[in-house]
Amino acid sequence: MRITVDCGEGEPRIVESDEPITIAEVLTRLDIAASTVLAVHGDTIVPHTSTISNDIEIELIVVSSGG
């Protein structure tokens, strides 16, 4: 399956997997710290524990923190 990830910085990045994969595993493959982003599919924020088993496009929203 093919996961298209829109990181908001130019061209989307692609992750391919022969087996179901969690969003957390996708982030690891892209070397993105899970604590720094929210994953969004359509208009819905999805947990990083969600398993992807079909081609999909997700958007990553950077989470800002601090004071």
Image (cartoon, rainbow, N blue to C red):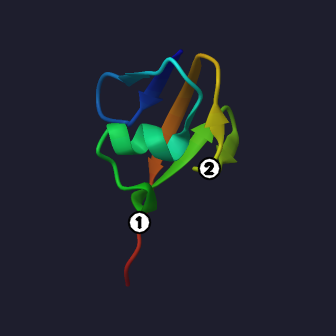
Q: Is residue 61 above or below residue 22?
A: below
* Residue drawn at x 59%, y 21% as measured from the top left: 56
Amino acid under disc 2:
Thr
* Residue drawn at x 41%, y 73% as measured from the top left: 65
Amino acid under disc 1:
Ser
> In the rendering, which numbered label is found on residue 49?
2
Q: Quadrant of the C terminus?
A: bottom left
Q: How would you rate the neighbour count of disc 2 (Cα within 10 Å): few for under 14, some for 14-19, many for 20 or more?
A: few
* Between discs 1 and 2, the one toward the N terminus: 2
In the rendered image, the residue lying farthest to the front is 19
Give the SS element for disc 1: loop
* Residue drawn at x 40%, y 59% as measured from the top left: 36
Q: Is residue 16 above or below residue 60?
A: above
Q: Is residue 8 left or right of residue 19?
A: left
Query: Where residue 27 sits: x, y (%)?
Result: 41, 43
The residue indicated by pointer 1 is 64
Query: Where residue 17 sits: x, y (%)?
Result: 47, 21
